């Protein structure tokens, strides 16, 4: 497995999530700050927002290769015109994203592994709703390319 840096890991994650288009996801964006969803049309939704993550060194591993942990958040935006959003849309999107990440556990061999963590409750108001998914990505650090 090659050594990586955060840019290559997040690019691999974005590429893998874009494979859900056009059936489940329309747009995937990476951002350093929370997006203003009003800048997107309903035609751009469902949308996955990859928020730039916190990064920390792995302290449990004492081998010679440096391992980094990225704690990323995916915010998934979608449209549902019901006052009480249909669980089918939410559950379908959540399952498709989890299955896609699970099928690409090593992000096409750019990471050691990635895990889906917490999935908070649904937020928003009619018609635009969102939920967040926490990810933990672990990779070997290429110390010459950081």
Image (cartoon, rainbow, N blue to C red):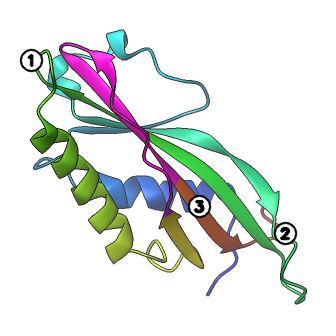
Q: Earlier in the sequence, mark 1 or mark 2?
A: 1
Distance between mark 1 and mark 3 Cα atoms: 32 Å
Q: Determine if the magenta segment contains residue 122.
A: yes
> Does the magenta portion include 111?
no
Q: In what quadrant of the picture does the N terminus appear?
A: bottom right
Q: Secondary structure at mark 2?
A: loop
Name the foreground residue: 5 vs 72.
72
- Which residue is disc 1 drawn over? 81
Image disc number at residue 20: none
The C terminus sits in image quarter: bottom right
**Rendered position, 21 above or below 4:** above
Magenta highlight range: 116-134
Compare marks 2 and 3 and give the one earlier in the sequence: 3
Provide residue 56's location: percent of width, then percent of height: 80, 57
Q: Is residue 100 visible?
A: yes
Position of 124 relative to 54 (above/below): above
Name which quarter of the figure residue 103 lies in. bottom left
Residue 25 visible in this rendered orientation of the protein: no
Q: Mark 2 — residue?
A: 143
User: Badges 1 and 3: C-beta atoms under 8 Å apart?
Assistant: no
| Marks 1 and 2, how far apart at CA | 48 Å
Q: Which residue is mark 3?
A: 136
Q: Is residue 134 left or right of residue 21?
A: right
Graded by Cα atoms within 10 Å as few (under 14), some (14 to 19) or many (20 or more), the crowding at tag 1 reads few
**Marks 2/3: CA–CA distance:** 20 Å
Q: Residue at x 90, y 86 (%)?
A: 62
Camera-nearest label, 2 or 3: 3
> For residue 28, what is the image quadrant?
top left
Left or right: residue 133 compared with residue 42: right
Q: Residue 87's x, y, as percent?
A: 15, 39
């Amino acid at each position: 497995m090659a050594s990586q840096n955060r840019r290559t890991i997040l690019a691999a994650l974005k590429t893998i999530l874009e494979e859900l288009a056009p059936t489940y996801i329309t747009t995937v964006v990476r951002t350093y700050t929370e997006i203003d969803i009003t800048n997107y049309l309903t035609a751009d939704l469902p949308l996955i927002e990859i928020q730039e993550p916190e990064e920390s060194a792995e302290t449990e591993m004492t081998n010679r290769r440096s391992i980094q942990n990225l704690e990323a958040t995916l915010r998934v935006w979608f449209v549902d015109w019901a006052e009480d959003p249909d669980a089918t849309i939410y559950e379908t999107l959540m399952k498709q994203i989890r299955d896609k990440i699970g099928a690409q556990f090593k992000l096409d061999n750019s990471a050691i592994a990635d895990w889906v963590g917490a999935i908070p409750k649904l937020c928003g108001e009619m018609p635009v709703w969102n939920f967040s998914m926490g990810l933990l990505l672990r990779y070997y650090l290429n110390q010459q390319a950081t």
